[in-house]
Image: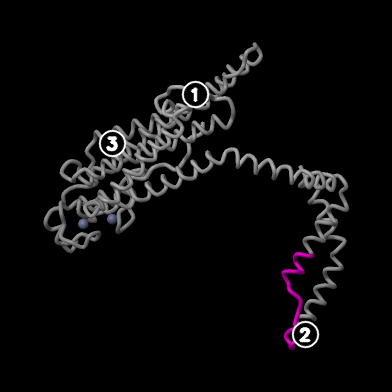
């Protein structure tokens, strides 16, 4: 709204200062000459600052309405600052909890991703430490806030009270982090299984399934909390009608997102059921022509697989590669679809609605 006002004033200011700028440019080149000859020039940053401040004052001088708005804002600033300080102080427990949850999640997520990439050389101690940390964190949160019945949110039961925006975002946000922790715990459990139980090349699709299941759970979990918030506190007819309309709009918007997630979940189940091979077995001549060793691990082929682009790799090396990439490691021909969530990572998105 203010932009046309400022733009118009700026162009008028530029017009009136065109001549002055030409004069300044001439004098600054003269000054540059003097500086090169050994003299000390003034700070160019300071000049720019003065120019911006001058332009700002000029714009304010030209527009009394704009000046009034700026002066009013200046009056409000200290009071807004006081309110912000009070808000931060009153909700400091909540803010600190969110920071701790975010830090714990980011750390656990990066450790799991690293360890998935390590395959047989994974560090079991690091994984156990993440497991203990996440379980302890969930236990601590549920214990600290047991009066609020936070644990109910994960199983679609109502928490203690939802009276304000803060309650809504608190319950939905904390619950989302806890559900993320649960999905990371499942992924760590899968990682800790021996290769004989679940081979490394098949783990990608299980990680995808765990993540998609967790995502759909996290999308469903806030619904009842939102409905309680939207319908709560209306005793009379107009309020009740408004509540019902808001619930209807929420459900329509949410339904679209849920349908999309349900489709992704179905695809993840299909991938678990089908046993996928990225190529076929090469014949001895093709192995010999390729040089006899795998271009990923530089060792003799273990279960060699020939891709459609005629490049050969170990089956295990390919499985690990295609958990992160979708093209041939040598020629970049597309072999598979998007490898999203197959590397053991968990979505950072905080499901607040
Ligand atoms: Zn290999
Ligand atoms: Zn290739």
Q: Provide the residue designation for mark 3.
A: 271
Disc 2 crowd, CA 10 A, few/some/many (<14, 14-19, 20+): few
> Is 42 a magenta residue?
yes
Q: Can see residue 332?
A: yes
249, above or below 32, in the image: above
Counting residues from the start of the chain, the first of labels 2 and 1 encountered is 2
Give the magenta-colored segment's residue range: 34-50
SS for dot 3: helix
User: Is residue 338 visible to the viewer in this orientation of the structure?
Assistant: no
Within 10 Å of disc 3 (Cα), the crowding (few <14, some 14-19, many 20+) is: some
Pointer 2 residue Cβ closer than 8 Å to ligand 2: no
Tell me the quarter of the image containing the N terminus. top right
User: Secondary structure under badge 2?
Assistant: helix
Mark 1 or mark 3: name the one nearer the start of the chain. 1
- Which of the pair 11/193 is nearer the observer? 193
Q: Mark 1 points at which residue?
A: 160
Indicate the position of residue 297 as horizontal and vertical percent values: 22, 60
Q: In which quarter of the image is residue 142?
A: top left
Name the residue carrying label 2.
34
Residue 204 higher or lower than 37, as above or below: above
Residue for point 85% across, 60% down: 15
Of the four image quadrants, the one with ligand 1 is bottom left
Element assignment for label 1: loop
Residue positioned 63% across, 39% down in the render = 87
Q: Where is residue 220 in the image (x, y as percent from the top left)?
A: 43, 27
């Amino acid at each position: 709204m203010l932009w046309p006002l400022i733009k118009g004033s700026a162009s008028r200011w530029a017009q009136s200062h065109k001549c002055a700028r030409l004069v300044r440019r001439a004098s600054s080149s003269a000054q540059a000459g003097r500086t090169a000859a050994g003299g000390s020039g003034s700070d160019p940053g300071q000049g720019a600052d003065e120019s911006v401040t001058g332009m700002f004052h000029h714009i304010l001088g030209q527009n009394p309405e704009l000046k009034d708005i700026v002066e009013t804002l200046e009056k409000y600033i200290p009071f807004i600052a006081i309110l912000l300080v009070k808000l931060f102080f009153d909700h400091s427990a909540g803010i600190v909890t969110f920071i701790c949850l975010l830090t714990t999640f980011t750390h656990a997520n990066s450790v799991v991703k690293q360890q998935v990439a390590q395959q047989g050389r994974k560090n079991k101690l690091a994984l156990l430490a993440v497991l203990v940390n996440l379980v302890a964190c969930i236990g601590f949160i549920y214990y600290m806030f047991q009066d609020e019945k936070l644990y109910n949110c994960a199983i679609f039961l109502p928490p203690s009270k939802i009276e304000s925006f803060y309650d809504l975002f608190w319950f939905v946000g904390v619950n989302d982090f806890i559900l993320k922790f649960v999905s990371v715990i499942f992924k760590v459990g899968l990682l800790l299984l021996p290769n004989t139980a679940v081979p490394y090349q098949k783990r990608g699709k299980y990680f995808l399934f765990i993540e998609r299941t967790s995502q759909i759970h996290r999308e469903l979990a806030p619904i009842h909390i939102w409905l309680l918030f939207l319908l709560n506190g209306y005793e009379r007819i107009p309020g009740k009608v408004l509540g019902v309309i808001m619930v209807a709009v929420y459900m329509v918007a949410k339904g679209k997102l849920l349908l999309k997630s349900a489709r992704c979940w179905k695809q993840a189940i299909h991938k678990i059921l089908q046993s996928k091979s990225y190529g076929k077995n090469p014949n001895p001549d093709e192995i010999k022509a390729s040089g006899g060793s795998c271009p990923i691990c530089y060792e003799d082929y273990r279960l060699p697989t020939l891709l459609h682009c005629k490049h050969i790799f170990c089956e295990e090396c390919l499985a690990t590669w295609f958990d992160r990439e979708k093209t041939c490691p040598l020629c970049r021909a597309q072999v598979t679809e998007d490898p999203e969530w197959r590397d053991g990572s968990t979505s950072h998105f905080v499901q607040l609605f």
